[in-house]
């Protein structure tokens, strides 16, 4: 009984000492958190998407408090909550926040099944990142969408879906929060988080990422930018520039005049708003004169070729029976195994054969004619 009592007393003393040590250590090394961080976190949407550039809403709240202590919230934006949430954050921190331009994710590729024909079949893991690492995709365009849907899987807001007809992702501007998750998931960087105008989310952008020269790009995709620079020439606001065989519209300078879209011969420049992309008319047909010339050339090519002038018979003499390769060259138009056409070995065999055209050098060498 005494042994049990002693054991209980010893264990109790050890527990008491350990508790006192832990208490004093926690007080000594306690990390004091600004209560404003919890207040800011409460007004954030808690999406933890990382679109703000910080590790979750908690990290963004800490960054806001530090920025407020430094005197400005400039450069900080919650893409999910937008301007209303930032105004709440600013009121908690006793700051003022400027108006931020709305943004939307845009897919800079128009390589539909019609514009960009498939030349191969990818039968690997259904992942854009894997497909981009192991092959160039199912088309000849090494810059366009791979169509495996990594961007769709990355979106937490159901704002982007794959169109089964075109094989391309489509963004719903009413749901997109511009968090940037889809852009980070795309291995070819064809998704851009783009500044748009006002609540209608209007914008012009170049729907292509192909940096090849015009002729090469057009062979890969009918809707590729050919770097003709017509859009750059007609823009009166210095918003359009062509670099590396690809046009780009600066959203900070674009005034939505639409002149670049009208000047583009390939209809690569696209207008979008909150309802989606503006439908494009089909490319204009070729001029009538050119079409007539093309039809005339096709008729001429399809016309039957007139037979060439008959030539004199060619007599080839052999000192031995013909070899199999020599028989193949003659294409079987005569029966070389017939007794009347070929004599026994060691004797001269004369074979008469008519050709519409002179023998090729390779035929003469194989036939060994004298």
Image: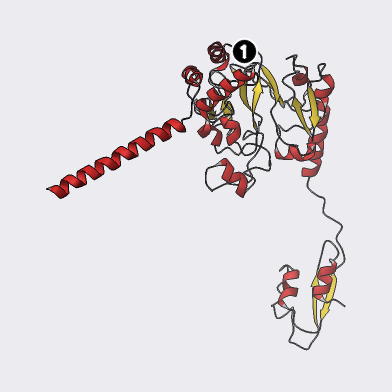
Residue 344 in the figure: left or right of residue 168: right
Q: Nearer the viewer, residue 313 or 18?
A: 18
- Residue 285: in sight, yes or no? no
Residue 46 in the figure: left or right of residue 17: right
* Rendered position, 145 above or below 176: below
The quadrant in which residue 54 appears is top right
Kindly identify the residue that appears in the image at 82 percent across and 50 percent down: 306
Q: What is the count of numbered marks?
A: 1
* Rendered position, 324 above or below 309: below
Residue at mark 1: 97
Q: Nearer the viewer, residue 266 or 130?
A: 130
Q: From this viewpoint, which residue is outermost toward the left?
A: 1
Residue 42 in the figure: left or right of residue 287: left
The quadrant in which residue 139 appears is top right
* Rendered position, 85 above or below 127: above
Element marked by disc 1: loop
Task: Assign the C terminus to one quadrant of the image.
Answer: bottom right
Determine crowd level at label 1: few under 14, some 14-19, many 20+ residues with C-alpha closer than 10 A. Answer: some
Residue 29 in the figure: left or right of residue 134: left
Kindly identify the residue that appears in the image at 55 percent across and 14 percent down: 93
- Residue 175: in sight, yes or no? yes
Residue 312 image offset from top left, x and y in percent: 87, 66
Kindly identify the residue that appears in the image at 65 percent across and 39 percent down: 117
The quadrant in which residue 319 appears is bottom right
Residue 32 image offset from top left, x and y in percent: 48, 26
Residue 152 image offset from top left, x and y in percent: 53, 32
Q: From this viewpoint, which residue is outermost toward the bottom?
A: 346
Q: Nearer the viewer, residue 365 or 89?
A: 89
Residue 305 image offset from top left, x and y in percent: 80, 49
Q: Colour scheme of this structure image?
A: secondary structure
């Amino acid at each position: 009984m005494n042994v049990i009592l002693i054991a209980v007393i010893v264990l109790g003393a050890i527990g008491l000492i350990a508790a006192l040590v832990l208490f004093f250590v926690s007080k000594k090394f306690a990390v004091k958190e600004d209560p404003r961080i919890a207040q800011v976190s409460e007004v954030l949407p808690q999406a933890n998407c990382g679109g703000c550039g910080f590790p979750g809403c908690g990290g963004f709240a800490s960054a806001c408090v530090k920025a407020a202590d430094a005197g400005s919230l400039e450069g900080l934006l919650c893409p999910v909550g937008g301007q209303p949430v930032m105004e709440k954050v600013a009121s908690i921190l006793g700051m003022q926040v400027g108006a931020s331009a709305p943004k939307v994710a845009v897919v800079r590729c128009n390589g539909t099944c019609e514009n960009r024909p498939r030349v191969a079949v990818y039968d690997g893991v259904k992942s854009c990142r894997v497909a981009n690492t192991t092959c160039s995709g199912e088309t000849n365009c090494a810059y366009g969408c791979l169509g495996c849907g990594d961007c769709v899987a990355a979106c937490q807001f159901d704002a982007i879906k794959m169109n089964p007809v075109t094989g391309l992702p489509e963004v719903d501007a009413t749901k997109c929060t511009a968090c940037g998750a889809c852009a980070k998931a795309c291995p070819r960087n064809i998704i851009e988080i783009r500044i748009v105008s006002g609540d209608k989310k209007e914008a012009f952008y170049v729907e292509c990422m192909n940096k090849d020269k015009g002729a090469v790009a057009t062979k890969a995709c009918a809707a590729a930018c050919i770097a003709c620079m017509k859009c750059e020439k007609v823009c009166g606001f210095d918003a359009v520039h062509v670099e590396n065989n690809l046009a780009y519209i600066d959203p900070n300078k674009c005034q939505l005049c639409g002149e670049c879209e009208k000047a583009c011969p390939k209809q690569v420049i696209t207008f979008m708003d909150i309802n989606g992309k503006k439908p494009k008319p089909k490319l204009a047909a070729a001029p009538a004169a050119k079409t007539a010339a093309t039809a005339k050339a096709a008729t001429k090519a399809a016309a039957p070729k007139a037979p060439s002038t008959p030539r004199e018979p060619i007599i080839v003499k052999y000192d031995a029976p013909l070899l199999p390769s020599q028989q193949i060259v003659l294409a079987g138009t005569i029966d070389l195994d017939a007794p009347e056409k070929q004599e026994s070995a060691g004797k001269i065999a004369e074979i008469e054969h008519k050709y519409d055209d002179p023998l090729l050098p390779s035929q003469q060498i194989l036939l060994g004619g004298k």
